[in-house]
Every structure is written in C-alpha cells, then in structure tokens.
Amino acid sequence: MITSIDKIMEDFGLGLARDGRVELKVHQAEWDRAFIFESERIQKAISDFPMSLHHMGSTSISTISAKPILDILAEVSSIEKMDKAQSVLEALGYEYKGEYGIPGRRYCVLYNTDKTKGFVHLHAFEFGDKEIQKHLLFRDYLRTFPDVAKAYENLKKDLSLKFKRSEYSEMKSEFIKKTLIEARAELTR
C-alpha cells in the first residue's frame, strides 16, 4: 500500500532501492522543493528546541548527478533533546537509528511503507560539532567550483558501475578528504 508520504516523495523524484545497488540520476529541481517540504514537516513536528536544517549531499548540488535520496543536516541545540524527539520523528515515518557509527550524530531514515526504498537521510549534530562544518564546506566548495563537482560526479559514475553501495561510499572518501583540504585552504586565501 502506498501512503501519501510515499507518493509525495516519489513525485519529488526520490526513492533509492535498498538492494545495495547504486543508482545515480541527473539532478532534478524537485529535490530542492523536496528539501523545503521535508524541512518544514520536521520543524513543524519538532518545535520545542532550536534547530537549523540544511540540504546537503549531492542532491543539493545542481550541476551533478546524485542518488535519489535527500540528505538533510540538522543542527540541534541538544542531542538529548533530539533523542527525546524520537517518537515524533517515528510518527513522521522515520526509522531512528541513533549514532549509527558516527559519535555525536543521530541518524534517521525515511523509508517507503514497505521499506524497500529510502527517501530521506536525516543527520543530526549539536550546534558547533565539527561534522557540520565538514558537510557544509564540502557542499559549498562543490557549488563554487564546477570543475571539482564534475570530477566528483565522474568518480561517482565510475564507482557506481563497479561497487555496491557500502563499497561505493567508502571509495569516495579519499576524494572527499582531498577536497576538504582544498576547501579549507581556499577559505584562508
């Protein structure tokens, strides 16, 4: 059975099958609208503590292809308050996964009703966490330097043909580290 949120997310062009394969799609303007829609839904549901939401990941970079799953970065006043909001997020359809391998993070995924596709990855960190700056710096650097974004896209396309999703993500890490070094150097110029 398709729920209304499943239909809404599919209409936004989102939905990555959970079969381990990597699927890249040409950027869609609907992804920016999906971020606005979903961030409003989250902020309306969790209004009792300060939170800033940012569109991150490849769907936030209009010049490159991306997996059709929205990445949202939440800066929150308190991880403990985020944990207390677990039931609220679950009522929105999210699966609350806790730190999920990254200390200080709270990670949630919005799946379709039968959990065969992922629509949204929500990554929450406390204000000031170093991970926030890394994610936003990488995004902003790719937005500012289209040649670097294109190199990243080419790498992703190549890796998507060779690897399953877990290896694919790992294989991008060296490029991301190198790009973050370049981005930090650019900031000091």
Image (cartoon, grey):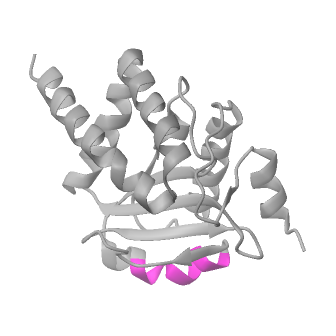
Identify the residue at horizontal 57%, vertical 33% (top origin).
65
Residue most toward the left?
188
Q: Is residue 174 visible?
A: yes
Q: In the picture provided, is 28 more to the left or to the right than 11?
A: left
- The secondary structure that dominates the magenta segment is helix
The answer to whether 157 is drawn above or below residue 76 in the figure is above
Pick the quarter of the image with the N terminus. Answer: bottom right
- Please name the residue shown 57% across and 50% down the image: 70
Residue 66 at x, y percent in the picture:
56, 39
Res 128 visible: no
Whether residue 184 is situated above or below residue 22 in the rendered picture = above
Say whether residue 182 is left or right of residue 125. left
| Vertical side of 7 occupied by 137: above or below | above
**Residue 131 at x, y = what percent?**
25, 53
Q: Quadrant of residue 147?
A: top left
Q: Residue at x 55, y 39 (%)?
A: 59
Counting from the top left corner in percent of width and height, residue 30 is at 71, 36
The answer to if 45 sits in the magenta stretch is: no
| Residue 17 appears left or right of 164 | right
Q: Of all residues shown, which one is farthest toward the right?
A: 1
Q: Position of residue 188 (x, y in %)?
A: 9, 22
Q: Looking at the figure, which quarter contains the C terminus?
A: top left
Magenta range is: 83-91
Which is nearer the eye, 46 or 184? Answer: 184
